[in-house]
Image (spheres, rainbow, N blue to C red):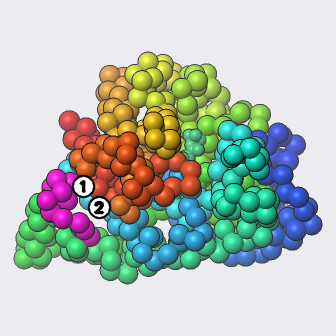
């Protein structure tokens, strides 16, 4: 019955299109068994929650709220521990408080969490010391270890991804609604030493918030809104076998939703108009995002909007610009202007990470904090000049004290990268750099 309704809603039309970046599953029977099981499991999110997020994204598109989307480049099954998940949530909550307080704007919190397990790769293989193996495509496909066995795509990992997503999302829901995120604990989220400028600045702000909250209490104010926060999940909808298997018919509207996350995005490498990713995403009713790199044009953006949001529903489509700091001021204006003049509703985010990656002299894939900030500044400049709305920030971060991005007030240098470089794919802002970034973005936002 449900399967028939899904097929009637056209969710399999993508099968006729070319799908880039899919693994070469060696065992089709095992793949069938895994996806058959995934079609029966409970959804991870409720369609109504995705609708709520769509409304929030619409508000961000109008300048009435600001989006903060962040998390790992690639989540790792073995790293889905209470400590690491809590540190990540805490980092996002702290950044959100800085932005909310610093710019007097509601902040929409979205984790690159609870499902960010599939990675697009520039090459199908990886060679080390003369040995060539299949590339690592994320924990949902294969394992990072550089052995023949580890790199074989294994469909059982689709089920593992579902279960680890479920436990991660459960902890997110527990922390954000169970008292941990209560604004009266804003001081306790801070960690590290107040000697660190970002932590000292946060501590001072937390003191001001504390006083404001106590004043409200004394004046008989209502606290319910301060006790819990709303946090949404998102990931790149790359692996179509997985996304299709978690698609469900919403019992209220009869429409299909991809219930693997609230927000799904299409990556820079899979956004062809006639490709399987755009076709699949055109059929589901979640809010969706598309990454736009430096080769994008206004015509591309308008064609994507026509395919993915033909009815012009506000909050349905978000564009995430990831141009590179050296290109954002040249390339982005034409695209934003074209979208503005067409009148179609789009929410604009900046991803200042993916256009600014390079290999350091010491051999680490890295980014520099100043360059990242420069792209964010460029994004704001472009929107201010065109009278359009800079709607939010999309970043790769972790709550741990890693050393993967150069710079910041701790001045991580080329040698320092080796100290604690843990990412399996792209370099992430650490906890302290994330907070610093939030303060700087709050300034841009309130300028
Ligand atoms: C990513 O977000 O990790 C990613 C691969 O981004 P992009 O598609 O923009 O390259
Ligand atoms: Mn990445």
> Which residue is at the front of the view, 5 or 43?
43
**Picture coordinates of residue 217, whole percent (x, y):** 12, 76
* CB atoms of marks 2 and 1 within 8 Å: yes
Please tell me whether residue 195 belongs to the stretch shown in magenta.
Answer: yes
Q: Which residue is mark 1?
A: 98
**Picture coordinates of residue 168, whole percent (x, y):** 53, 72
Q: Which residue is mark 2?
A: 94
Quarter-wise, where is residue 221 in the image? bottom left
In this picture, residue 219 sits left or right of residue 193? left
> Which residue is at the front of the view, 249 or 335?
335
Residue 418 appearing in the image:
yes
The structure residue drawn at horizontal position 48% and vertical position 21%, both measured from the top left corner, is: 331
Q: SS class of the residue under badge 1?
A: helix
Quarter-wise, where is residue 389 in the image? top left
Where 78 sits versus 64, above or below? below
Quarter-wise, where is residue 86 in the image? bottom left
Where 23 sits versus 273, above or below? below
Q: Residues within 10 Å of mark 1 (few under 14, many from 20)?
A: many
Residue stretch rendered in magenta on the structure: 189-203
> Residue 152 got which mark?
none
> Which residue is at the front of the view, 325 or 284?
325
Residue 58 appearing in the image:
no
In this picture, residue 126 sits left or right of residue 79? right
Query: Where, quadrant-wise, is the C terminus in this rendering?
Result: top left
Where 340 sits versus 446, above or below? above
In this picture, residue 258 sits left or right of residue 191? right
Q: SS class of the residue under badge 2?
A: helix
């Amino acid at each position: 019955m449900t399967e028939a309704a899904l097929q009637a809603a056209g969710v399999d039309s993508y099968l006729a299109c070319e799908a880039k970046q899919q693994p070469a599953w060696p065992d089709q029977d095992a793949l069938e068994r895994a996806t058959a099981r995934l079609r029966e499991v409970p959804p991870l999110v409720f369609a109504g929650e995705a609708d709520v997020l769509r409304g929030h994204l619409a508000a961000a598109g109008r300048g009435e709220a600001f989006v903060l989307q962040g998390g790992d480049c690639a989540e790792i099954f073995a790293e889905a521990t209470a400590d690491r998940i809590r540190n990540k949530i805490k980092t996002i909550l702290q950044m959100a408080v800085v932005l909310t307080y610093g710019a007097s704007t509601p902040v929409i919190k979205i984790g690159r969490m609870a499902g960010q397990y599939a990675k697009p790769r520039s090459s199908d293989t990886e060679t080390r010391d003369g040995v060539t193996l299949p590339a690592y495509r994320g924990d949902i496909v294969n394992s990072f270890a550089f052995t023949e066995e580890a790199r074989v795509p294994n469909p059982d990992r689709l089920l593992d991804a579902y279960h680890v997503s479920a436990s991660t999302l459960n902890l997110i829901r527990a922390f954000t609604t169970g008292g941990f995120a209560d604004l009266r604990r804003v001081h306790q989220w801070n960690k590290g030493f107040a000697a660190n400028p970002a932590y000292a600045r946060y501590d001072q702000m937390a003191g001001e918030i504390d006083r404001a909250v106590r004043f409200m209490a004394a004046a008989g104010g209502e606290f319910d809104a301060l006790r819990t926060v709303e946090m949404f999940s998102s990931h790149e909808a790359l692996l179509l076998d997985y996304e299709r298997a978690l698609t469900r018919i919403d019992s209220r509207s009869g429409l299909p939703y991809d219930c693997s996350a609230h927000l799904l995005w299409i990556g820079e490498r899979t956004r062809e108009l006639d490709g399987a990713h755009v076709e699949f995403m055109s059929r589901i009713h979640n809010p969706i995002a598309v990454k736009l790199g430096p080769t994008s044009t206004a015509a591309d953006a308008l064609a994507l909007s026509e395919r993915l949001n033909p009815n012009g529903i506000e909050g349905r489509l978000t564009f995430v610009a990831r141009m590179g700091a050296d290109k954002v001021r040249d390339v982005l204006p034409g695209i934003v202007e074209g979208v503005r003049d067409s009148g179609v509703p789009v929410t604009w985010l900046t991803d200042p990470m993916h256009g600014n990656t390079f290999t350091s002299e010491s051999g680490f894939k890295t980014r520099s904090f100043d360059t990242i900030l420069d792209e964010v500044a460029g994004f704001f400049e472009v929107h201010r000049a065109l009278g359009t709305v800079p709607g939010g920030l999309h970043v790769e971060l972790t709550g741990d004290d890693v050393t993967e991005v150069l710079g910041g007030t701790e001045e991580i240098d080329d040698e320092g990268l080796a100290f604690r470089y843990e990412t399996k794919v792209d370099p992430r802002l650490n906890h302290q750099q994330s907070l610093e970034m939030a303060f700087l973005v709050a300034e841009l936002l309130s300028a």
